[in-house]
Image: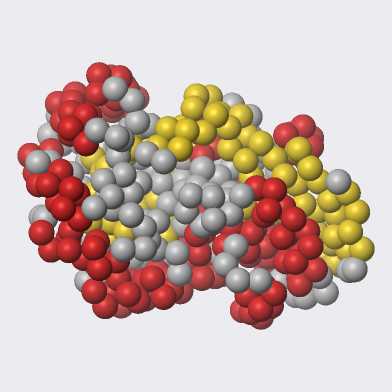
Amino acid sequence: MKIVKAEIHAVEFPLKEPFIISYATYPHMAAVIVKLVTDTGLTGYGEAVPDEHVTGEQVDGTYEILKNVLAPQVIGQSPFDIENIHHRMNGAIARNPAAKAAIDIACYDLMGKATGQPVYNLIGGRAHDNLQYPKVLSIESPEVMAEKAKKAMEAGFSSLKLKVGGADSATDIKRIYAVREAVGPGMPIRIDVNQGWKTVGHAVQVINKLEDANLTWVEQPIRMGNIRGLADVRQKTSTPIMADETVQSMEDVLEIIRLEAADYINIKLMKCGGIFPAIAMAKAAEAAGIIAQIGSMVESSVGSAAGYHAVMSRRNIETAELTGPLLFAEEIGDLDFQLPYVHLADKPGLGVNVDEVQLQKLTTMACVVEGEQHHGN
């Protein structure tokens, strides 16, 4: 079985309401959907959601790199040769992990369909009885966040994730305590600063003021890349620390292990290049006693399902935050969310049915790559 064609779609997913985090506000989510076709007629889907603030990628560039650099590298290859495919992609261009993730995910979808197995059975099998997801709250006023948290708890969510890291950390503290008061002492709350508290001293000062909030963890309080600084934060506070934007490669995981910089790491397929490198990073973390999570760049059902398959396959990937499909006003897939669980279909591949009509509707640019031939706009 060989890959003979790649269809590449730049798309825009409209959001039900703007998604607000410390460094950006998103009125919609831009992505690139890749469809790989084999000489046996099988099709596999992958997704890239670039984030210029984290990986340095941007949707137009990701589209062009997939079209001109990465898709040609996999034409004529077997999707089962996933290590060689990553070697070819890494040899063709450095970095660009979201673009590489789209190819990786589509290859796993093809492998599953070719063998009649869900993807998780190809990478470790079923390691969890069920998969849960939290309610994720954007940065808003303390009163609004508290009210939304209360409604989420009443709706049946079993945990909350609060986006904080605004310009005023005193208001962040008010947000967190307002939510804690609204939901009571028993609801697990994790907070994601998205680098917003910047310096070690500032982060330590704020985290120590949150001791009574009983937080599950504080995620990426300082600027990405400063792993030594994250270790300092962890040493000077008692609330568990999660590394996110800082974790983009196996090298980052090894440095976090060396410096004892985090209790948890947030692995995202879009940051590391797909399922294949994500599983390797999770195994390295497991050997060091670090718990992993699979996080989201706000993907559709395609990218989200890929992440949940990775979660299902590894015991030390204990949590997931792949809720993109719930935020979209229009989508292309049918990943099954039944609050507070997501259910992976025991179908071959990703188990997601892609609505081609809806895909075309949301497409802003499209092309086809076949051998040396490119056509499209």
In the depicted structure, whether residue 268 falls above or below residue 175: below
- Residue 96, given in percent of the width and then of the height, sits at 60, 62
From the viewer's side, name the closer residue of 138 and 118: 138
Q: Residue at x 12, y 47 (%)?
A: 205
From the viewer's side, name the closer residue of 5 and 230: 230
- Residue 333, given in percent of the width and then of the height, sits at 64, 40
Q: Quadrant of residue 335?
A: top right
Residue 145 visible in the snapshot: yes
Coloration mode:
secondary structure
- Residue 243, given in percent of the width and then of the height, sits at 32, 58
* Left or right: residue 126 compared with residue 366: left
Residue 348 visible in the snapshot: no
Q: Residue at x 88, y 63 (%)?
A: 370
Check the picture and name the quadrant holding the N terminus: bottom right
* Left or right: residue 113 compared with residue 156: right
* Left or right: residue 312 compared with residue 168: right
From the viewer's side, name the closer residue of 22 and 243: 22
In the depicted structure, whether residue 95 falls above or below residue 241: below
Q: Residue at x 47, y 53 (%)?
A: 54
* Left or right: residue 165 compared with residue 97: left
From the viewer's side, name the closer residue of 56 and 328: 56
In the depicted structure, whether residue 124 falls above or below residue 300: below
Q: Quadrant of residue 70?
A: bottom right
The count of marks equals 0
- Residue 33, given in percent of the width and then of the height, sits at 70, 49
In the depicted structure, whether residue 87 falls above or below residue 266: below
Q: Residue at x 14, y 26 (%)?
A: 181
